[in-house]
Amino acid sequence: MERTTCCVVGGGPAGMVLGLLLARAGVEVTVLEKHGDFLRDFRGDTVHASTLTLLDELGLGPAFARVPQQLIDKAQIVLDSGPAMIADLRRLPGPHKHIAFVPQWDFLDVLADAGRAEPTFTLRMNTEVTGLRRERGGIAGVQYVDTSTGATGELAADLVVACDGRQSLVRERAGLRTRSFGAPMDVWWFRLPRHDGDPTGVLGRFSTGRAAVLLNRGDYFQVAFLIRKGDDQRLRAAGVDAFRREFGELVPWLADRVDAVGSLDDVKLLDVRLDRLPRWHTDGLLCVGDAAHAMSPIGGVGINLAVQDAVAAARLLAAPLRRGRVRTAELARVQRRRWLPTALTQAVQRAAHTRFLSPTLDGAIPPSTDGRAPAPIRLLQRFPLLQGIPAYLVAIGLQPEHAPTFARRNG
């Protein structure tokens, strides 16, 4: 029987940060990743200001700085009534007054390289978890298959941490059920060429019945086209020409480039979910990140919250793991630490769904008494200092976590 102290399921940002921090605490940790590499087309490629500060604390700032990236220091939207700045990250405290858009595989490689430098860290690729081991009524490890050979095996562990995303198999096998808050939209993701002189930063375009967000990725825009929840099949049936026409009407200055979407096969669906586990743990198992709470894409805060979960878990669980016994009460401390910022962030997202996105996609004019932009957006334009508030909520978060002393290194 193979054995480790902590088995982390999922080699995404949360799993890799947790694995690295625990290894620096001297805990034997094994991260299982079902794919053979990190070279996949992620849409969530944001590294927020609080995560950039964490990387500095871990001594990884110089390595991360060598990764190709786009730095974003503002976010604006364009309504039918005109443009409006909604977040100014230049007002943030600390050295990182921006968000970095980085290919996620490069970010994960930085973390993986740092982990491999620790003697108690193991990263196993091509290892897909298929079930859980149970002993004396609790979780005692995982069952897995090697996706490159088909060989199966079991890995015993004092603690299993589910970092395997919003469709977590580990969570499902443990019998943990989420509470869903619903969402009015799904997202179509695609790419369009970006030219010199095009807008920088993050740009949202909202009109009656339609909305899109453009993310500057250097030589192209990563486009999030918002559609009503459940409309994917109907819109695909209408064909690519109808899609090109509708998007061109929403963003006219990109109409001459929309032919870059050769077919709707180039358009990927994100099934938007907003949910949360009432209880993030059971005996021998902890869920963090999307496995514990799927976030709306509003603000792109999902990765940031997942990383902060991982930091809190490492700080609170390193000592119990070194002792070889993690009690359920200690797992509950992680949830108590991270529950409030998660719940408040989701409350803000739910309010944005109800008050703005739902009426926009339903074809209603966003709430306003005089036909202009909604009152909160007008307030941000009148008092630009307030633009630092949404910037802080998105780029740093309600309860940022810092690297524990045992994990800190000089860059």
Image: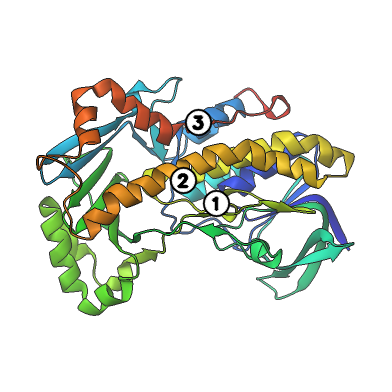
Mark-to-mark CA distance, 3 and 1: 19 Å
Side (left or right) of 317 relative to 390: right
Q: Decide: marks 2, 1 in contact (CB < 8 A)?
A: yes
Front in this rendered view, residue 370 or 377:
370
Numbered tag placed on residue 346 in the rendering:
2
Residue 10 sits above or below residue 389 on the image? below
Q: Which residue is mark 1?
A: 293
Side (left or right) of 245 relative to 202: left
The residue depicted at 16 percent of the width and 55 percent of the height is: 208
Q: Quadrant of residue 202?
A: top left
User: Where residue 283 appears, x then y in whole percent?
Assistant: 79, 54
Local secondary structure at mark 3: helix
Furthest residue toward bottom: 237
Marked residue nearer the N-terminal end (2 or 3) = 3
Front in this rendered view, residue 53 or 293:
293
Marked residue nearer the N-terminal end (3 or 1) = 3
Q: Decide: marks 2, 3 in contact (CB < 8 A)?
A: no
Q: Determine crowd level at label 2: few under 14, some 14-19, many 20+ residues with C-alpha closer than 10 A.
A: many
Local secondary structure at mark 2: helix
